[in-house]
Each structure stands twice: as structure tokens, then as C-alpha cells.
Amino acid sequence: MVGNMNFWDLIVEKMGDKEISAYKVSQLTGVPYTTIVSYRNGHQPTIEKADKILSALGITVTLGEAHQ
């Protein structure tokens, strides 16, 4: 994520940029609307749901390598 931005803040920013609602994101992803808005209350998405939502909004996440 960007800086101290949480998942919901990032989603809201990108929805605003693309002028789409949480309902539309729900339609695009198959993730229930109530699940999407639950993130506003601090719930964290599963990796699968986060990937669907981020992909629908055109956000690419690259994970670095883990080092021990």
C-alpha cells in the first residue's frame, strides 16, 4: 500500500479516480457489496478478495522476496 494508507482508503481513492461505486466494484468482482463496505469498518479482506477488488480497479501489487 501507499504510505500509511489502509486497504479501504486505497479502494476509496481508486473508486473516486475511476468514478465507480462500491456496488459497481461488487458487480465487477463477484464480492458481495456488504463484504466490500465491511472493509470501511476495519475488516481485512482475504488475499483472494483483495486481489479481485484491486484487479477490478486496475491496481497491481508486487510482492518482494522473503529473506531469512
Image (tube, rainbow, N blue to C red):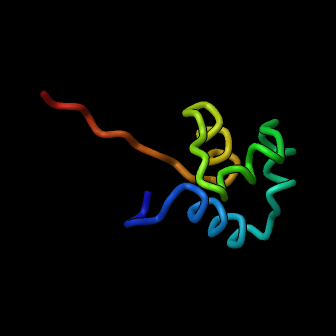
- Residue 48: x, y in percent? 61, 31
Which residue occupies 55% across, 55% down?
A: 7
Where 24 falls versus 12 (above or below)? Answer: above
Residue at figure coordinates x 37%, y 66% from the top left: 3
> Residue 5 at x, y = what percent?
47, 65
Q: Nearer the viewer, residue 51 or 7?
A: 7
- Relative side of 48 to 19, left or right: left
Identify the residue at the far top of this view: 68
Query: In the image shown, does 2 or 38 lie closer to the viewer?
Result: 38
Rendered position, 13 above or below 35: below
Residue in the picture at 57% in, 44% down: 44
With respect to residue 55, does 24 lie above or below?
below
Which quadrant of the rendered structure holds the N terminus?
bottom left
Q: Position of residue 50 (x, y in %)?
A: 60, 41
Specify whether 31 is left or right of 6: right
Q: Residue at x 40, y 43 (%)?
A: 62
Reply above or below: 8 against 54. Answer: below
